[in-house]
Image (cartoon, rainbow, N blue to C red):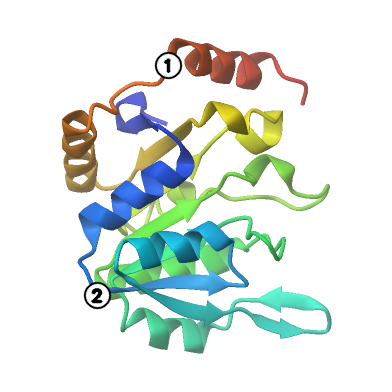
Amino acid sequence: VDSSHVLYTMGLLHGIALAIDLFTNVGDKILVPSPTYRPFRELCLRSDRIMHDYELGYRSGEFYLDRERFDAMASESKMILFCSPHNPSGLVFSRDDLKFVLETAKKYDIPVVSDEIHADLVHTGVEHLPMGKANENIGAKCITYLAPSKTFNVAGEHSAIAIFSDAEMEKTFKKKQSALWLTSPGFLIGELTQVAYQDGLD
C-alpha cells in the first residue's frame, strides 16, 4: 500500500464516526448489514443518521449476502458501513461478494466504509480479501480500516489505520483530522503496531 494514503486515527470507531460526519448528512440512511456490532447502530443514532438495517440472508446454518435486497437498499442509502470479516456472524465475504458491494456503491455514487479489524482471525482455509484490494479495478469510493487491537489484544490503546481509495475523501478526512488535532498516534501505539505486525508470530 502506498503509505501516503494511510492515516492513523484515534481508534477505529473514532475513524468511522469521522467518516460518517464528513461524508453523510443528518437524516441520511446508512446501510449496515446485520446482525450488527452494537456500536455501529449507536454511531448512526448519535450522528442523527438512520441505520438502514440490511439483514444478511440465512440458510442451512450459514449467513450470505442477498444481492437483490442489498442493491435495493443501497439505492436509498448514502453510505455503506461494512464489516469484513463480518462481526458477529463470522461471515468471510467472497471476492465476488466484495466486488458486488463495490460495484453497487459505485453505481449509486456512495462511499463504502469497511471495518476489517478481524481480518487476521479467519479460520484456516478461508481467505480474507481487503476491500481496498478488491476495489483496485472498480474505483468505488472506499475507506478500509484496520487495527492491531483484536489480533494482538491491544484494544486499550485505541489506534486504527485508515486506507483511502479516493484522493478527495482522503484530503477532506485529513483536513478535519488536523482541525480536531487528531493527526498522529501516540508514540507507544505507533511502536507497538509496528513491532506487532513485523515481529509477531504468524
Q: Given the image, on which type of amino acid does mark 2 rest?
A: Gly
- Find the distance from the CA under tag 1 to the CA under tag 2: 35 Å
The reply, left or right, for residue 3 in relation to residue 53 is: left
For marks 1 and 2, the one nearer the N-term is 2
The reply, left or right, for residue 107 in relation to residue 99 is: left
Q: Residue at x 38, y 60 (%)?
A: 112
Is the residue marked by circle 1 packed among few (<14), some (14-19), or many (20+) residues within 10 Å? few
Q: Residue at x 58, y 50 (%)?
A: 129
Query: Helix or strand or loop: what does disc 2 sit on?
Result: loop
- Foreground residue, 144 or 183? 183
The reply, left or right, for residue 132 in relation to residue 141 is: right
- Which mark, residue 186? 1
Q: Is residue 45 visible?
A: yes
Say which quadrant the N terminus sits in: top left
Q: Residue at x 32, y 59 (%)?
A: 140
Contact, mark 1 vs mark 2 (Cβ under 8 Å): no
Residue 13 at x, y = what percent? Answer: 45, 46
Q: Residue at x 44, y 48 (%)?
A: 132
Q: Is residue 134 visible?
A: no
Say which quadrant the C terminus sits in: top right
Residue 19 at x, y = what percent? Answer: 30, 51
Q: From the viewer's perspective, is residue 88 above or below residue 129?
A: below
- Foreground residue, 170 or 185? 185
Image-quadrant location for residue 35:
bottom right
Q: Given the image, on which type of amino acid does mark 1 rest?
A: Gly
Query: Helix or strand or loop: what does disc 1 sit on?
Result: loop
Q: Which residue is mark 2?
A: 27
Q: From the viewer's perspective, is residue 201 above or below residue 9?
A: above
